[in-house]
Amino acid sequence: HHLHHCWHLIWHPLRLNYLVVSLTENIMSITRCASSSILPLLLAVAAIIISSSSVHSQQFQQPPPSQPLGDVLFQLLDKDKNQKVTLDEVNSQLNMLEMMFNPVEGAGGDDSGNDEANEYKQLLSGVKSAAPTLFNLLDVNSNQSLSKSELAHVTKFEKALKKGGGMRELLRDVFSILDENADELLSVEEIMDGSANDQVITELSTRVHELFPLRSDADELKDFVTSSIESIAGGGAVVDKESVAKGMKWVDDDGDGHISKKEVAKYYNLAGKKFMEISKTIKQLGPMLAMFGGMDMNGGGGDGFKMDL
């Protein structure tokens, strides 16, 4: 009953947040080796923060953004305050957010609200599926928990998105390495070949490791880079021409069966701007919510983001 009562208070900001997070699904999949593993968790955290802030905003003053993004995430996710974040704690926050949508199921009135809630729940389902991969990637020492220093890589990612941060150059290199015939277009065949070519995987892993040294050497990122390329095919067990072609459609604006640099830049810019907006929200409201029970509701920028390939 409590969640049902709170729903009317939080639905409006959640609808706005839905518009934000839905756009981030359009990031270019070949860049997931450096980016989309971090985006899902940020989307979930931002949604929780915005929802919680609608309840607490009249009681507490929002602190100014000052702490690094990784530090704020650490405060929010470390529910028991034992200086480490476990996968169970991450899943607990995601489950709490998912429960917030259950009260509207089967309710009368405007069906559009239910439709949006169901779409949001589908997105959350994808976030929960990606959480273990993200967690393992950030768990540098493989001790089944994330330290403050390991979550600092999220701060590094945020800085990389800014001008001169290196993400633009990394994306250009990823595109060029996969573009075997140098025609500035990525075909289905080139993406399939790239996922199975050890030399290509090595080059991509090296470039990712240079910007994001998440492991002691680049070879340890090979499996992650390979799965990131294969995810274009939907993450299925079989990567074939049909599945890759289907996965490319959402970024292939002109429908020519290829992905151009212009198309990559368009969706990368959209996702990058939304990432910076979500990051700003987390840094503004996160420290306050961490002081008052973290993200447990039952307990008491992107200015100037622009890239041309």
Image (cartoon, helix red, strand yellow):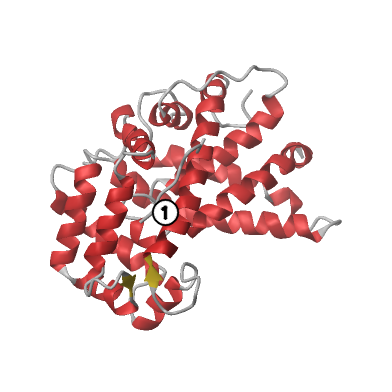
Secondary structure under tag 1 reads helix
- The x, y position of residue 247, in whole percent, is 43, 72
Q: Can you say whether 110 is above or below 282 in the image?
A: below
Q: Does residue 146 appear anywhere in the picture?
A: no
Q: Residue at x 32, y 46 (%)?
A: 167
- The x, y position of residue 65, in whole percent, is 50, 23
Residue that mark 1 sits on: 130
Q: Does residue 150 appear anywhere in the picture?
A: yes
- Circle 1 packing at 10 Å, graded few (<14), some (14-19), many (20+), is some
- The x, y position of residue 20, in whole percent, is 59, 48
- The x, y position of residue 221, in whole percent, is 21, 52
In the rendered structure, the answer to whether residue 205 lies left or right of residue 35 reads: left
Q: Residue at x 29, y 79 (%)?
A: 189
Residue placed most toward the observer, 168 or 146: 168
Q: Residue at x 42, y 57 (%)?
A: 265
Q: Residue at x 78, y 38 (%)?
A: 5
Query: In the rendered view of the protein, which quadrant contains the N terminus?
Result: top right
Residue placed most toward the observer, 231 or 184: 184
Q: Which kind of residue does numbered mark 1 sit on?
A: Ala
